[in-house]
Amino acid sequence: MPKKAEITPASSLHGFMPYAEAEVEEYMNEKQELHFKNILRAWKQELMEEVDRTVSHMKDEAANFPDPADRATQEEEFSLELRTRDRERKLIRKIDTTIERIKCRDYGFCGQCGVEIGVRRLEARPTADLCVDCKTLDEIKERQLTGG
C-alpha cells in the first residue's frame, strides 16, 4: 500500500504547512481564518522585502555606461524589474483586500454564487474570491470576448 505523500518544507506556502482540517469542523472558523491571515501577511511581507531589494539593487547598479548597448541592456533589465514590481504591487493590494474580507468574515465564500471556495483551493491561491466553477465560467467568457 502506498504511503501518503509527505509534506516537505518545499510544499509549504510562505513557510506555513497546509491546513489540517478536522473531520467535523465548521468551514472558515476562527482557526482557519487565522491560518489564512498569517499566510497572507507572510506573503505580503515577502513581496515588500522584494520591493526593498529592487530599490537598493537599482540604486547600486545604476551606472551611466559609455557604450549604448550596455546602457540599453541595463535599462531593459530595470524595465523588467519595474514591471514585475508593478504586478506585485497589484498583488499586495489584492492581499490587503483579502485580509479585509477575513476581518468582515466574508472570506472563503464565492463572490458570485456564495458557495464555499474550499480550503484546498484557498491553500493554492489564498486571494481567490471565486469558486472553481465561477472562475471557469469567467475564463470561458473572457476567451469568447477576446477571441483567445
Image (tube, rainbow, N blue to C red):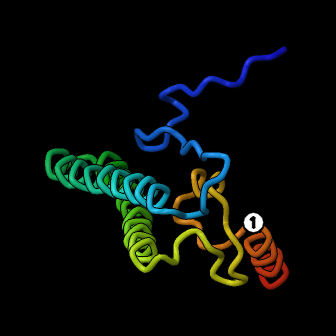
113 to 26, vertically: above or below: below
Write down the residue under mark 1.
Answer: 132
Q: Secondary structure at mark 1?
A: helix
- Quadrant for residue 132, please give it: bottom right
Q: Position of residue 114 (x, y in %)?
A: 68, 80
Residue at image position (43%, 80%) is 104
Q: Quadrant of the C terminus?
A: bottom right
Q: Nearer the viewer, residue 45 or 61?
A: 45
Report the label total.
1
What is the crowding at mark 1: few (fewer than 14 residues within 10 Å), some, or many (at least 20)? some
Image-based side of 141 in relation to 18, left or right: right
Choose between 64 and 19: the one closer to the eye: 19
Residue at x 34%, y 57% (from the top left corner): 41
In the displayed orientation, state which residue is furthest to the front. Answer: 24
Residue 80: image location, x then y, percent: 41, 56
Measured from the top left, where is residue 115 in percent x and y? 71, 75
122 or 83, nearer to the observer: 122
Q: Nearer the viewer, residue 61 or 23?
A: 23
How far across and down, in percent of the image, does residue 61 sit?
19, 45
Q: In what quadrant of the picture does the N terminus appear?
A: top right
Q: Which residue is located at x 76 percent, y 73 percent?
A: 139
Q: Quadrant of residue 6?
A: top right
- Is 118 placed left or right of 125 in the picture? right
What residue sits 31% from the left and 45% below the top?
Answer: 70
- Amino acid at dot 1: Val
